[in-house]
Image (tube, rainbow, N blue to C red):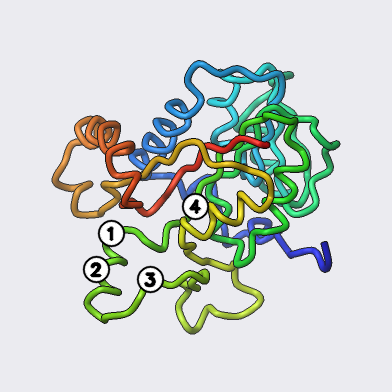
Amino acid sequence: MGQKKRADFYDGPAHDYLRYWDGRDYEQAAEELAMRRLLKGRHFASAVDVGGGYGRLCLLLKDFADHVTLAEPSRRQLDIADRFLGEDPTIDRVQTQADDLVFADASAGLVTMIRVSHHLPDPAAEFAEISRVLAPGGTAIVEVANLAHARNRIRYLLRREPMPTEPVDIRSAENRHDEEIPFVNHNPRVVIEQLAAAGLRTERVLSVSNLRSTTLKKLMPHRFRVALERLLQPLLAKVYFGPSIFLLLRKG
């Protein structure tokens, strides 16, 4: 697969991913809604959460799998996971890179990769690894940092420019250097094609975090916003409205 990508950004003390989620209750709830909707009625012997940080979604995955593995490149995040997850024998923690997973071929029934794509300017190797690790007929959920969200579409329309097909670096000019964490947005149509090339067929799409807005946080009660989010996720999927797109995939 060529030169391996550096993916230990969250080892640094400046990146406290656990504290990042303080005040992001809506985003957490929106992602949990999407995961539960996509996995409803399914159960797996084993699930792998690729790039899962400190295990934020592993407790949810326990409801759908007998055994869950947190696959994370950052040693610091895995140390936090030990505290966050506790001594749960059904959740393993493994330090591994997403483009070179340590798991055997066809060893998992479910693989998830959430809030990772925005760190991957070229996700082809990661998609190939997800496909390799999945058993035939296995399920994956991949989240896409969406370039084609509603506000961006308006911006490109006003500039009379087509929506890019290549990933767009959203870092500020002063942060565009190798030492800073990559942050890109992807065109979801292109990502779906890339996943298909890796043998992962898209079965369902959800638009997620549709009401992500500082203003709405102040004006709209949390419970109402989450209830509205529940309605909007399938309705807005076809137009890729939200900043985050969740894809339900099947291998083969």
Q: CA distance from mark 2 to mark 3?
A: 10 Å
Mark 3: amino acid: Met
Query: On the picture, is 9 further left or further right than 227?
Result: right
Q: Are marks 3 and 1 in contact (CB under 8 Å)?
A: no
Tag of residue 245: none
Mark 1: amino acid: Ala
Q: CA distance from mark 3 to mark 1?
A: 11 Å
Element marked by disc 2: helix
The residue singled out by tag 1 in the image is: 150
Q: Earlier in the sequence, mark 4 or mark 1?
A: 4
Element marked by disc 3: loop
Q: x, y percentage for residue 128?
A: 73, 51
Q: Are marks 2 and 3 in contact (CB under 8 Å)?
A: no
Q: Earlier in the sequence, mark 4 or mark 2?
A: 4
The residue singled out by tag 2 in the image is: 154
Residue placed at 55% from the left, 44% from the top?
Answer: 142
Depth check: 176 or 155 in front? 155
Q: Earlier in the sequence, mark 3 or mark 1?
A: 1
Q: Earlier in the sequence, mark 2 or mark 3?
A: 2
Q: x, y percentage for residue 132?
A: 77, 42
Mark 2: amino acid: Ile
Looking at the rendered image, the disc whose residue lies closer to the viewer, 3 or 4, is 3
Q: Are marks 4 and 2 in contact (CB under 8 Å)?
A: no
Query: On the picture, is 125 further left or further right than 176?
Result: right
Q: x, y percentage for residue 178?
A: 66, 77
